[in-house]
Amino acid sequence: MTAADATALRLSLLLALATVAILLPMAIGLGRWLAITRWRGRPLLEALLFLPLLLPPTVVGLALLVGMGPASTIGRLFEAVTGGRLVFSFAGIVVASVLVNLPLAMQPALRAFEAVGDDLRAAAASCGLSPFAAFRKVELPLAWPGIATGAVLAFAHTLGEFGVVLMVGGAIPGETATLSLAIYDRVQAFDMAGAGRLALLLTAISVLAITLLFLLGRREGGARG
Amino acid sequence: MAEGLQVDLAARAPVPLRAGLHVPPGQTLALVGPSGAGKSSLLKAIAGLLPASGQVRVDGVAWQDGATGLPAWQRRVGLVLQGGGLFPHLDALGNVMIAQEQPDGDVARALLAAVQLEGAVLQRRPAQLSGGEQMRVALARALSREPAVLLLDEPFAAVDRPVRRALIALVARLRQASAAPMIIVTHDLEEAAGIADLAAFMDAGAIVESGPAAEILSTPASRLNRWLASA
């Protein structure tokens, strides 16, 4: 593995970890709220939150490039605060990655909070648990396997993310050039052996993440059953 | 002022409800009536689990006054839901301790012993317990808060007849140790007669008949029995 590959691997892992760290509280908050709300606009909001997963990465990337670009409000605000650009930066691909992976992280959390059910929430209240205590002692432990499933899925998906990262990040070495972009670069340079090694590394990390997911699935069965 | 439970509530969902009743301290009221009459909704409204307006007073203290009321978790209710409503991630002991203001394993074990649960069964999760054992844990949990009101929503519907008889006898025995007014929703008149001092017949969201249990449950001319005869 070259120094550039190691940097790309470090960037990929950092991106995946940052994405999951930001997504986790968002997935818990949004998932729980959507699970209990009786708001009529819920289906539309859920559909909108799902959209980044269904649209082609180039479409999402283009939208983010325009929405976070130097001419946009978000881009100007970011530049005023940090002095740097949001697009073609590590912060930019983190924002893009969070938006793209939100449905992956949130959906399992949402379904897990739905599965807790009104009866257990009623039982928790009648046990004298305040809404926060009920969330901490009943809802979170029961929904945790679903939340963790979403986090693992988002982590694995971020590691393999290509289109959106390329569009928003521009594959700048040491800044936005992740492992999946490094594989693409190797293929472009006809270095199939190098591309294969990096692909194997990415596959190994993904297999590890998915194994963790299945282990969590078995624990979920145990907690419920 | 010890005046028990006084209820005069109106709610819109899930069924339109307009019901009043009074249960003196230490007495049990059996709430009977057809499915969809609003019996479970009335219990939930008393417990603060459904938006409602009106009055709920427990020993003179207002739990609900007009449209405002104490949140559910501040109402000292011992609630047993249909199916028990036990927390699946906690064992039997944990299900009782979670409802204690000051978690105390010894007190929780004593409560579980009072419902005839001891030994290894305390470390089992709800899915590993029989229907009867689940209801015993639910009863112990309901009693663990030293409730001001006991509300039991068809607690024995999911267990077979011999277990049901044993549980009715158990509730009747536990009943004598608590002065809390109790309402038990049931479809089973034998069950009601075995426990209740009072009975109320509920239909279409309203209490249409109430009085001493023996009178309501046994008198052929009661509206409950006329309804049963026509059903």
Image (cartoon, coloured by chain):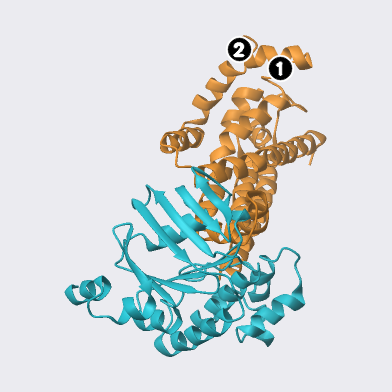
Chain colours: A orange, B cyan
Query: Does label 1 lie on the same chain as label 2?
Result: yes
The answer, for residue B80, to whether it is visible in the render is yes
Q: Which residue lies furthest to the left in this view?
A: B230
Query: Percent x, y for residue B215?
Result: 33, 78
Query: Percent x, y for residue B25?
Result: 55, 70
Q: Which residue lies furthest to the right in this view?
A: A3
The answer, for residue B52, to whether it is visible in the render is no
Q: How crowded is mark 2: few (under 14 residues within 10 Å), some or many (20 or more)?
A: few
Query: Percent x, y for residue A196?
Result: 65, 44
Question: On the image, which quarter does residue A154 sit in?
Answer: top right
Mark 1, chain letter?
A
Under circle 1, the secondary element is helix
Instruction: Give the mark nearest the N terminus, 2 or 1.
Output: 2
At label 1, the amino acid type is Phe
Mark 2, chain letter?
A
Total numbered circles: 2
Under circle 2, the secondary element is loop
Q: Which residue is drawn at 40% across and 81% down?
A: B191
From what the image shows, is residue A170 above or below residue B34? above
User: Between marks 2 and 1, how big is the CA–CA gap?
Assistant: 10 Å
Residue at the disc numbered 2: A72
Left or right relative to A195: residue B46: left
Q: Residue at x 42, y 58 (%)?
A: B42
Left or right relative to B222: residue A170: right
Query: Percent x, y for residue A164?
Result: 58, 29
Residue at the disc numbered 1: A78
At label 2, the amino acid type is Ser
